[in-house]
Image: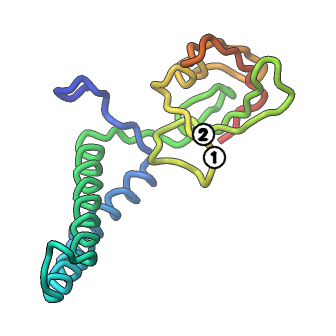
């Protein structure tokens, strides 16, 4: 199912869905109350045109409201998927893959999934991105080619794990 913009619904693990729901709940309750208090305190300081605290609080409010809208849109049509359940050793959403770019001796781990499902500092590859599309369903030992902004790149899948 796609929304009116044509975008596919986010595919999230149940754990990530619950975490994002909790974040949304926190922002729409505690977050909004705290921002309102900060704005009110800054207003009490006087002239708003030169009031740095007021402008900082309004900026924080704008960023928070933007995140609220982002979470609401993401969660509205989210599709819950199982995390990295690969019984046949192929790349699926939620798996970690170790890749080696052609012509490079170093390897790098990537998490295949939604940016919201990131794992620490590990780079995330969306399954809908060119690299993600090329990796889906492939296994360790496979070489895949994909279109990157700088041209075609080839990577070898060294390892597939959860």
Q: Quadrant of the N terminus?
A: top left
What percent of the width, then of the height, locates residue 47?
Answer: 13, 81
Label placed on residue 57: none
Q: Residues within 10 Å of mark 2 (few under 14, many from 20)?
A: many
- Indicate whether 107 appears above or below 137: below
Q: Split into 4 quadrants, where in the image is the C terminus?
A: top right
Residue appearing at x 22%, y 77% in the figure: 51
Question: Residue at horizontal 24%, vertical 26%?
Answer: 2
Residue 82, placed above or below residue 147 = below
Does residue 24 appear left or right of residue 17 in this picture?
A: left
Circle 2 residue: 111
**121 sits left or right of 149 in the view:** right
Q: Position of residue 74 (x, y in %)?
A: 29, 44
Measuring from the top left, give residue 30's x and y in whole percent.
26, 76
The answer to whether marks 2 and 1 mark residues whose Cβ atoms lie closer than 8 Å is yes
The residue where tag 1 is placed is 122
């Amino acid at each position: 199912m796609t929304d009116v913009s044509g975008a596919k619904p986010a595919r999230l693990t149940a754990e990530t869905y619950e975490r994002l729901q909790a974040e949304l709940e926190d922002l729409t309750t505690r977050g909004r109350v705290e921002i309102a208090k900060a704005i009110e305190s800054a207003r009490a300081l006087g002239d708003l045109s030169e009031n740095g605290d007021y402008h900082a609080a309004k900026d924080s409010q704008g960023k928070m409201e933007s995140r609220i809208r982002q979470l609401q849109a993401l969660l509205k049509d989210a599709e819950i998927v199982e995390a990295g359940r690969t019984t046949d050793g192929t790349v699926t959403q939620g798996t970690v893959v170790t890749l080696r770019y052609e012509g490079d001796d170093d390897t790098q781990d990537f998490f295949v999934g939604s940016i919201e499902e990131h794992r620490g500092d590990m780079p995330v590859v969306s399954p809908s991105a060119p690299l993600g599309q090329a990796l889906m369903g492939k296994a360790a030992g496979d070489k895949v080619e994909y279109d990157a902004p700088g041209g075609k790149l080839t990577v070898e899948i060294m390892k597939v794990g959860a």
